[in-house]
Amino acid sequence: MSRSQRVSAARALLSVMPLVNRTMGRAMRVNASAVTPLLPQQYRLLGAISHRSRTLGEIARIQGVTPATATTLVTTLESRGWVTREHDLEDRRRVVVSLTEEGATILAHSQQIAEAAMADVLEPLTPEQLSRLLDGLSVIDGLGRSSAPR
């Protein structure tokens, strides 16, 4: 693929991100009465630690924020009982953040809300369009997984 094709693909991908963000934000606000409102950054953070605990430094890198901002996000989630923060047993200078059972429940509920909202947005697509979209997203997801911090 040529550079101009990659730039066109990047432009197309970036152009749909506001739709995804708006849809998720609206869905979270509409369903805020069921749970404490979950901001997109908080949703991403819970997802980042859903499979394993992470250090504050890893969270900052994954979120694309400063360590101070990551600390603020974690403090908010910790005050809600959704994450715990503990010192690493091997290196007391490192702080490890883990998802609590309540945090996992909130994440699962928020995931269902987000999926339902996005499914509504995709409703007008034909089966062929959905298949092509899934193929493309699978490729992008693979790129993200291969470059994501472990």
Image: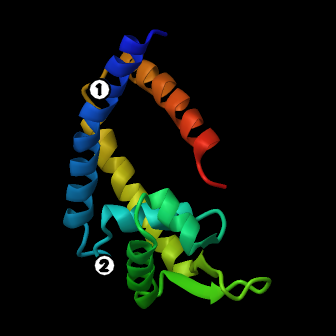
In the displayed image of the protein, which residue is found farthest to the top?
2
Image coordinates for residue 6, horizontal then vertical, percent: 41, 18
Towards the viewer: 58 or 104? 58
Relative to 25, say whether 95 is above or below.
below
Q: How is the image coloured?
A: rainbow
Quadrant position of residue 56: bottom right
Image coordinates for residue 145, horizontal then vertical, percent: 60, 42
Image coordinates for residue 127, horizontal then vertical, percent: 39, 19
Label 1 residue SS = helix
| Circle 1/circle 2 CB separation < 8 Å | no
Name which of mark 1 and mark 2 comes first in the sequence: 1
Q: Residue at x 39, y 12 (%)?
A: 5
- Crowd rating for badge 2 (residues with CA inside 10 Å; few <14, some 14–19, many 20+): few
Nearer the observer, disc 1 or disc 2?
Answer: 1
Name which residue type carries label 1.
Arg
Q: Residue at x 49, y 10 (%)?
A: 1
In the displayed image of the protein, which residue is found farthest to the right?
90
Residue 11's disc is 1
Relative to 135, say whether 107 is above or below.
below
Relative to 76, say whether 26 is above or below.
above
Relative to 21, say whether 95 is above or below.
below
Name which residue type carries label 2.
Thr
Q: Residue at x 50, y 76 (%)?
A: 103
Towards the viewer: 121 or 88? 88
Residue where numbered disc 2 is placed? 36
Residue 58's disc is none
Image coordinates for residue 137, horizontal then vertical, percent: 47, 30
Q: Residue at x 66, y 66 (%)?
A: 52
- Crowd rating for badge 1 (residues with CA inside 10 Å; few <14, some 14–19, many 20+): few
Spatial distance from mark 1 to mark 2, Cα to Cα? 34 Å
Label 2 residue SS = loop
